[in-house]
Image (spheres, grey):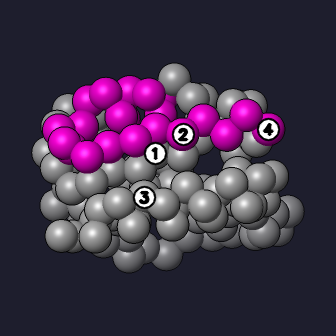
Amino acid sequence: MKYITFFFLFILATGVLGQKKQFNREIEIPSKTPLANGGLTNLILSNETSSTSLTGDLRKVTLPLLVLTGKYDFVVPPALAHDLHNLSSSLEKKIVVLEKSGHSPMIHEPIKYRNEIISFIEANK
């Protein structure tokens, strides 16, 4: 059985919904733009992500779905993780709210994060 693991809203970047886009354009990077921690990605994709909604397509997600979110994620609030979980058509789906994490649960709770992924993959082989 095929499986796919989503780190919350990774769906936007993967093209799982068949909405792959080419982002081939020249951009001018302001001299004080922080390029670490996603600064360059945010700069390049900010126009596209602010004007693109894939919420209506979430029902097309039918592969097993693991949604991992941090309880204290103020970048992508856990309510959006619950929306992703609830709106997908996956028959095998699980949502995990990591209680001691913010936006980077793989850093805040690496063992629990890893164990959830391994467990999900094992259950959906």
Residue hosting label 3 = 120
Question: CA gap, disc 4 to disc 3?
Answer: 20 Å
Write the residue at 54% across / 39% down.
Answer: 96
Question: CA gap, disc 2 to disc 1?
Answer: 6 Å
Question: CA gap, disc 3 to disc 1?
Answer: 10 Å
Write the residue at 20% across / 32% down.
Answer: 56
Relative vertical location of residue 10 with respect to residue 74 in this rendering, above or below: below
Quarter residue 83 falls in: top left
Q: Are marks 4 and 3 in contact (CB under 8 Å)?
A: no
Select label 3 or label 2 by which is in front. 3
Stretch in magenta:
80-100
Residue hosting label 1 = 67
Q: Secondary structure at mark 2?
A: strand
Query: Counting other residues with Cα less than 10 Å from the Cα at mark 2, is it few (<14), some (14-19), or many (20 or more)?
Result: some
92 inside magenta stretch? yes
Residue hosting label 4 = 100
Write the residue at 59% across / 41% down.
Answer: 69
Q: Are marks 2 and 1 in contact (CB under 8 Å)?
A: yes
Left or right: 102, with 25 as reference point: right
26 inside magenta stretch? no
Check disc 2 and give the amino acid type: Val
Question: CA gap, disc 1 to disc 4?
Answer: 16 Å
Quarter residue 20 falls in: bottom left
Total labels drawn: 4
Question: CA gap, disc 4 to disc 2?
Answer: 12 Å
Select label 4 or label 3 by which is in front. 3
Select label 2 or label 1 by which is in front. 2
Circle on res. 96? 2
